Image (cartoon, rainbow, N blue to C red):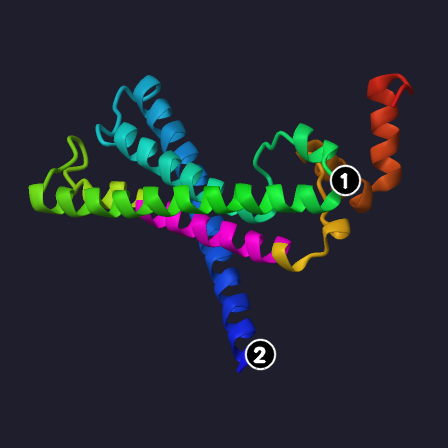
């Protein structure tokens, strides 16, 4: 039974991750492409889509929210670790768990109240100005993205809880990026870094 549950949550995590990545990528790519086409149409052909600006905003909004949700799983959000670095391993682990628990509660609350607001929008039948679509469609990003982020934070909470205090790694975002670059192309990375820093790195 335990294996089935673990398999289920592993695949659920992969599915949520794929959804987050896909929406973030499609949103940013679609928004950029639409904005570019509209600018070209306006200044070259003296004609543009009246609804393009509104749709571009919605695409960027969905991309940003779901991209942020994905970043929770990858620990890609900016974190201040001054206090964590000064605490012993057990204290640092406890503080990390507390931080993740508070974050989880906040995300669930925003998702829940976002859902309540969504129901209100459905009742009011408010529509967008240019696209003339129900406003609950673009607003649905709030409960969906925040629920996805809450699940990701819950994953990290369980991961930290199961990890021994001495093995809990606390690295800054810059350190993680540098480590990844060194693993992919260490020699080339070092050469480029030395050229840009004058050999002072």
User: Does residue 64 appear in the picture of this structure?
Assistant: yes
For the C terminus, give its image quadrant.
top right
Q: Which mark is residue 12?
A: none
Residue corresponding to mark 1:
181
The quadrant where residue 80 appears: top right
Residue 194: give x, y in percent of width and height.
Answer: 88, 24
* Distance between the alpha carbons at the discs numbered 1 and 2: 35 Å
Q: Is residue 31 left or right of residue 132?
A: right
Q: Is residue 96 left or right of residue 192?
A: left
Q: In the displayed image of the protein, which residue is found farthest to the left?
A: 124
Q: Residue at left 86%, top 21%? A: 195
| Image vertical order of residue 20 relative to residue 88, above or below | below
Q: Is residue 143 left or right of residue 107?
A: left
| Image vertical order of residue 20 relative to residue 56, above or below | below
Q: Is residue 188 left or right of residue 95?
A: right
The quadrant where residue 2 appears: bottom right
The residue carrying pointer 1 sits among few (fewer than 14), some (14 to 19) or many (20 or more) residues within 10 Å by Cα, namely some
Q: Secondary structure at mark 1?
A: helix
Residue corresponding to mark 2:
3
User: Does residue 69 appear in the picture of this structure?
Assistant: no
Q: From which residue to which does the magenta span run?
A: 143-160
Q: Nearer the viewer, mark 1 or mark 2?
A: 2
Q: Residue at left 40%, top 28%? A: 36
Q: In the displayed image of the protein, which residue is found farthest to the bottom?
A: 1
Queried whether the magenta region covers residue 147, the answer comes back as: yes
Q: In the displayed image of the protein, which residue is found farthest to the right?
A: 199
- Viewer-nearest residue: 5 or 130: 5
Q: Residue at left 74%, top 44%? A: 89
Residue 130: give x, y in percent of width and height.
Answer: 17, 31
Residue 128: give x, y in percent of width and height.
Answer: 16, 35
Q: Secondary structure at mark 2?
A: helix
Q: Main secondary structure of the magenta part?
A: helix
């Amino acid at each position: 039974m335990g294996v089935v549950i673990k398999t289920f949550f592993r695949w659920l995590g992969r599915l949520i991750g794929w959804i987050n990545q896909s929406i973030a990528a499609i949103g940013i790519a679609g928004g950029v492409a639409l904005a570019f086409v509209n600018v070209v149409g306006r200044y070259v052909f003296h004609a543009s889509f009246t609804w393009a600006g509104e749709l571009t905003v919605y695409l960027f909004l969905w991309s940003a929210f779901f991209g942020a949700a994905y970043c929770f799983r990858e620990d890609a959000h900016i974190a201040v670790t001054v206090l964590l670095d000064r605490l012993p391993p057990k204290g640092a682990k406890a503080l990390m768990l507390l931080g993740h628990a508070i974050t989880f509660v906040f995300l669930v609350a925003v998702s829940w109240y976002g859902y309540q607001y969504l129901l209100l929008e459905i009742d009011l039948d408010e529509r967008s100005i240019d696209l003339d679509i129900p406003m609950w469609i673009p607003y649905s990003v709030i409960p969906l993205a925040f629920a996805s982020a809450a699940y990701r934070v819950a994953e990290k909470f369980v991961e930290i809880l199961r990890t021994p205090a001495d093995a809990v790694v606390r690295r800054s975002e810059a350190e993680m990026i540098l480590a990844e670059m060194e693993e992919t192309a260490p020699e080339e990375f070092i050469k480029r870094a030395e050229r840009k820093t004058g050999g002072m790195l």
